Image (cartoon, rainbow, N blue to C red):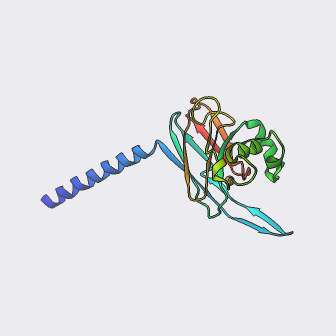
């Protein structure tokens, strides 16, 4: 009987500990990049590289962690874009690389600002990991963070409650994430 009571206490403590861990970790959400890519000259150009989960809900002020979880060495960005650019991507205009090449478009702007030159930010001396025009944190178009293969990037979401932030990867603009701010 005494042993059963001790076991009950241990289980109760375990539940409290688990609940404490769970509530402590709910402030920081993690989004991983996953997916596959394939290129066969004159035949196949295929990519399922994506943000997972694609949509998250956070409280204003929370921090989100992005983790490079795919096996490709290409970097990724979390680049906040205006909702007005998304219909174009869904018609597969920008998703088919125009986003990289048309001056003034968000991919071109973000890549130049992060990398200091065209490409995949191979040159460490010209890299800038955080672009943060306006108020601190991720809250408006142009805000962007860069993370390389094997790295993570974290950012505080400072948009007010009720905001919906759309973001893309400037290198792979078919990667589209949504942050719902509560
Ligand atoms: Cu990417």
- Residue 134, by quadrant, is top right
Residue 171 percent location from the top left of the image: 72, 52
In percent of the image, x 61 and y 55: which residue is there?
148
Residue 164 on image: x %, y %: 64, 36
Question: Considering depth in this image, is 1 or 78 the residue closer to the camera?
Answer: 78
How many labels sit on residues?
A: 0
Residue at the spot x=69%, y=37% of the render? 142
- Is residue 95 visible from the viewing direction of this image? yes
- Residue pushed farthest left? 2
Q: Does residue 1 show up?
A: no
Going 64% across and 48% down the picture, which residue do you hit? 127
**Is residue 22 shown left or right of residue 28?**
left
Question: Residue 136 lies in what quarter of the image?
Answer: top right
17 above or below 143?
Answer: below
Left or right of 154 in this view: 110:
right
Q: Which residue is situated farthest in the right direction here?
A: 42
Q: Name the foreground residue: 121 vs 34.
A: 121
Residue drawn at the location 60% of the way across and 30% of the way down: 162
Classify the position of the C terminus by image quarter: top right
Image quarter of residue 57? top right
On the picture, is 13 further left or further right than 20?
left
Give coordinates of residue 128: x percent, y percent. 63, 44
Direction front: furthest residue:
125
Q: Quadrant of the N terminus?
A: bottom left
């Amino acid at each position: 009987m005494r042993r059963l009571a001790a076991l009950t206490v241990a289980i109760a403590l375990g539940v409290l500990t688990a609940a404490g861990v769970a509530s402590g970790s709910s402030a920081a959400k993690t989004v991983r990049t996953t997916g596959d890519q394939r290129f066969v000259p004159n035949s196949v150009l295929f990519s399922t590289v994506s943000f997972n989960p694609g949509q998250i809900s956070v409280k204003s002020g929370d921090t989100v962690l992005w983790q490079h979880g795919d096996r490709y060495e290409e970097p990724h960005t979390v680049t906040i874009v205006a909702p007005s650019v998304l219909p174009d991507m869904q018609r597969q205009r920008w998703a088919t690389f125009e986003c990289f090449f048309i001056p003034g478009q968000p991919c071109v702007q973000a890549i130049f600002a992060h990398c200091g030159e065209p490409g995949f930010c191979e040159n460490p001396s010209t890299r800038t990991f955080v672009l943060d025009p306006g108020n601190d944190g991720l809250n408006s178009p142009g805000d962007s963070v860069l993370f390389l293969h094997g790295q993570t990037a974290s950012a505080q979401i400072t948009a007010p409650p009720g905001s919906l932030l759309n973001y893309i990867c400037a290198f792979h603009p078919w990667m589209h994430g949504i942050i719902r701010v509560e």
